[in-house]
Image (spheres, helix red, strand yellow):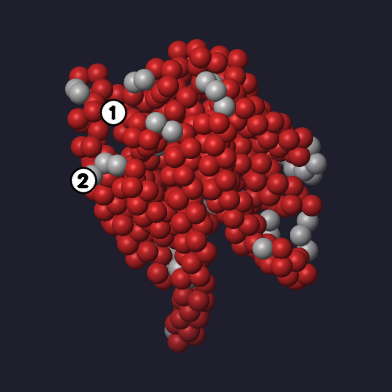
Amino acid sequence: MNKMVQSFMSRHEINRDLVILLVIGGLYSLGIFLSNTFVNIYLWRQAGDYMTIAMYNLAIFLFQPLSFYIAGKMAKRIERVIVLRMGVIFLSLFFIIVLLLGEQAATYNFMLGIVLGIGYGFYWLAYNVLTFEITEPETRDFFNGFLGILQSFGGMAGPIAAGYIITQLPEATGYTWIFSISFMLFIIAVVCSFFLRRRHAEGRFYFKRILDERHHNKNWQRILYAHFFQGLREGIFAFVITIWVYLITKSEFYLGVFNLAFSGMSLLVYFVAIKLITPTKRKIFILYGSLVLYASLFIILYRMNYQSLIIYAVIIGIAYPLINVPYASLTYDVIGKAWKAKEMRIEYIVIRELFINLGRVLSISVFIVSAIFLDIERVIPYLLILFGVGHLMIYPLIKNIYLQTTEEKELLVKEQLSDEKNR
């Protein structure tokens, strides 16, 4: 990795802001992966019911798009770095509140979800915009690739380290330690943000105009609906599988091993995916990845034990990169070719986030209603089968997306000029 960085830096000028933004992204990833995997378990150990966990996650997905909207308006009026800093501060505040509440945290589950959702919204809105502004076309691949490596290592090291700490220390002491470490990582990230160069904001926030653009741009409409169905799966899958791993093993360490299997395989497939997937192959890889992802669900529904869960972790670790790499590229290509994309990139990002979270909120809401009126233990497998279809719906929606290439545009211009001459 060091040779790769040195080789790249010898060919391109890496500015200070790019390095600082990578450091902030690495600190964020490690802090989140270290603790967030175990917040659901921490609340479960206190409350022991699915409703508490579902309401916590519902609050996150309700307030994340709301904070995206507010952060988007702010990012056009104040410096983007301040918005980023606010996101990290809210994430730090989340862990402070968890530490202060201690054994009473489950009682305030919805409030905790609100604080975390706000933190996510402010952080990711600002980070996405700063990435676009700080990186150049020749450094963007390096930045995204290196950030992906940092996130993957965070996903591997964080949960297994946290699981070991929790199991080695008595009672809730282990949780106190990992939440405290995450808090310190976010404080360091805030300090790092003061070294970023100030970037002044400009322009108005045209949320409704870009929302209405889906009626004029079929590609934008299709990608938004695809993100809605993506959110349908992510809603209840965000916590149900984690709870199942803990209920079967009764050990946070083995939950860490589960995440290690998932993130480790994802890291390997990520490197393969970026070499194999080309623009012409994006849609077929999304289809294959979605089929594998949905089929993996039946491994744990057929026989529920720790071994089947590890196999499931490995398979979804293969499937997600096959979906996410081409899907993310396709999404940004659609936005990049949309109406006034340069001036309205913040609005496009905010609206995309709105549709993802609409799907998440709907699936969790159905889960909550089911928990009120039905035996949720029996209903969960059927809900997973129903909402697991979410990613399968992406391909039918994106298969008709057509983006004209630069070569095709040039050819069209030549044909038009030729026609004019003939006339």
Q: Secondary structure at mark 1?
A: helix
Q: Report the residue that reaches farthest toward the bottom.
A: 422
Position of 173 with respect to 409 (left or right) is: right
Q: Residue at x 40, y 58 (%)?
A: 318
Characterize the local packing of mark 2: few (<14), some (14-19) or many (20 or more) Cα atoms within 10 angstroms: few
Which residue occupies the foreground of this view, 21 or 23? 23
| Amino acid type shown at disc 2 | Tyr
Which residue occupies the foreground of this view, 76 or 239? 239
Rendered image quadrant of residue 228? top left
Q: Which mark is residue 300?
A: none
Q: Which residue is mark 1?
A: 367
Q: Is residue 380 above or below residue 262?
A: above
| Amino acid type shown at disc 1 | Phe
Can residue 206 be seen in this snapshot? Answer: no
Rendered image quadrant of residue 314? bottom left
Residue 27 at x, y percent in the picture:
66, 41
Residue 88 at x, y percent in the picture:
65, 32
Q: Is residue 244 above or below residue 213?
A: above
Q: Which residue is mark 2?
A: 302
Q: Residue at x 23, y 44 (%)?
A: 303
Residue 102 at x, y percent in the picture:
55, 16
Which numbered disc flags the more N-terminal residue, 1 or 2? 2
Q: Secondary structure at mark 2?
A: helix
Position of 389 with respect to 48 (left or right) is: left
Q: Residue at x 40, y 69 (%)?
A: 281
Characterize the local packing of mark 1: few (<14), some (14-19) or many (20 or more) Cα atoms within 10 angstroms: many
